[in-house]
Amino acid sequence: MSDIIRRDPRAEWIARNRLHPLHAAMQPAQHSWMGPNGVIRKNLHGVGFIGPNGIKRIDRSGAQQGGAAKRTAAVQVQLPLHQVPTPAFYINVVPDMVGGRLSSHDRDLLGLARQLAGSDGAVLAVVFGEHKESAFATAGVDRLLVLDGHEFDGYSPEQRVQGLRAVDNQFNPRHWLLPDSRSGGGELGRRFAAALKERPATRVWQIKGGECIGRAGAGQEDLARPLPRLILAAVECAEPVSETRHEVLPMELSTTLARSLPRIEDLGAVAVDPGAIPMAEAEFIFSGGNGVKDWALFHQTAAALGATEGASRVAVDDGFMGRDRQVGASGTWVTARVYVAVGISGAIQHLQGIGACDKVVAINLDPTCDMIKRADLSVIGESAAILQALIAAVDTYRNGAKRDAA
């Protein structure tokens, strides 16, 4: 394992916040302290304590290795469980669940629902089809309703609206929350509002005092209006849930959905050239920096992955990539679901530009650079060898999929 010390910003924040319920669990054990008479008292049973004979006490539990001051394992903190046995009302949330998992936008939406639910209400998440998410409990979901069936596969807004109407009739929620996104939530929310004959609040970024504030005038103005029942919320509408875990009790519909002949036929996804996708809209970005020595191999790897190419400012200044491909505060701020940084050390401007990315993968020779510290997954090594291995892995995976299909 690597000896790199990784910081946990959330744990550090809890350790500084004395009002947080987990503050005491984050405090380091005291080995010495000042007594009431001004005498320094010492914990004789502390790990690594040097006794009066100059002998260091050994911790045989494995927390201390050879007496060296090494990084210990992070303390597993059990978040307090929030339970709502008999909800007074429901706040229904329909997350996008792109790729079968909660996105950062979905988590912001659940944080807003948690604020509206308070202590008496329950947050009910409505999910279509199979999902891969296992963190509903820490995202703020009290009840989970999965509408499964082939009729909800692919692009099926009419069937989904029909399912939401059945949920509305059974649970009669106080509010419906959907993400105002291009991933489906914006369109589904507007179709659902038309079916309910209600006027939704769109592009909402704040709710307070019984009013909601949404963006208007091409994003240049704020529009305040009374809080409606149907809300389409924007990104960063609230802080995600991080201090509690929830029951995630499964729920079922009491009625069977009637199958209707859809008027929309889903012909599948349309192939799009990744190079033609604007950087600000790309979901998968493969970005190169000063550490890339073989740019032909870099382009070949991006094509094999089907990713949109990006670059650091150094690579753009050196002429390896166009100015429209520059990522960072001085270039384009990106919100990709996956961002791969090859040979990028991580200047502050670049890190600012990728701050909204969900997952960051770093490939670098320097294990101490800032990009490695920022990354969710790091690969230490020569970029050329790693890219060649990546291309080979992609080819093997695709050839295996073709054989299985045959």
Image (tube, rainbow, N blue to C red):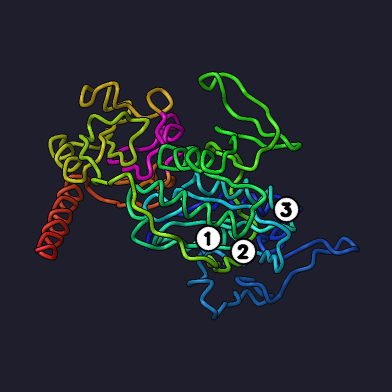
Q: Dot 1, how many residues are within 10 Å of its Cα: few (below 14), some (14-19), or many (20+)?
A: many
User: Dot 3 corresponds to which residue?
Assistant: 118
Mark 3 or 2 closer to N-term? Answer: 3
Q: Marks 3 and 1, Cα distance to the nearest angstrom? A: 18 Å
Q: Specify the segment rendered in magenta.
A: 333-357
Residue at left 36%, top 49%? 156
Q: Is residue 405 above or below residue 314?
A: below
Residue at left 32%, top 37%? 344
Q: Marks 3 and 2, Cα distance to the nearest angstrom? A: 13 Å
Q: Is residue 346 magenta?
A: yes
Q: Is residue 250 magenta?
A: no
Residue at left 21%, top 46%? 305
Closest to the camera, between mark 3 and mark 2, is 3
Viewer-proximal residue, 339 or 267? 267
Residue 351's image quarter? top left
Residue 143's image quarter? bottom right
Helix, strand or loop at label 1? It is helix
User: Dot 2 corresponds to which residue?
Assistant: 246
CB-based contact (under 8 Å), mark 2 and mark 1: yes
Residue 255 in the image, given as x and y percentages of width and height: 52, 65
